[in-house]
Amino acid sequence: MLRLDDKIRLTSAEQRTHQALTGTGAPTTVQQHDAQLEEAAQVWEQGESAEEQLAAMLARDLQIAPQALPGAPVAAKD
């Protein structure tokens, strides 16, 4: 991935992964990238199979600036 400020360009392999998880084309901003992956994660979470749950976790893991999950512990700041 190439990144300049908020603009991104995914490699062809990253584009294929993103498309497989989200069903959308390649994003051009960090916000678009993360929003598409979060939306996909929420859809995948609705599934009952282990594979669907894994896809949801993968979608969240691939986010650049992931959102904090409700109830997740917050890291202490020094």
Image: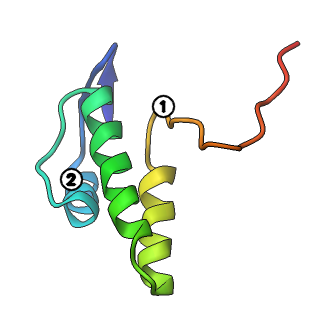
The numbered dot on residue 8 is none
Circles 1 and 2, Cβ within 8 Å, touching? The answer is: no
Q: Residue furthest bottom?
A: 49
Left-right relation of 65 to 78: left
- Residue name at image x 51 percent, y 62 percent: 57
The relative height of residue 25 versus residue 67 in the rendered view (above or below) is: below
Residue 32 screen position, x and y as percent: 25, 33
Rendered-image quadrant of the N terminus = top left
Residue denoted by label 2: 15
Residue type at numbered disc 1: Ala
The relative height of residue 48 versus residue 77 in the rendered view (above or below) is: below
Q: Mark 1 to mark 2: distance in Å? A: 18 Å
Residue 31 screen position, x and y as percent: 31, 28
Which quadrant holds residue 2? top left
Please tell me how crowded label 1 is: few (under 14), some (14-19), or many (20+) other residues with Cα within 10 Å.
few
- Residue name at image x 33 percent, y 63 percent: 43
- Residue name at image x 50 percent, y 37 percent: 66
Which quadrant holds residue 30? top left
The numbered dot on residue 65 is 1
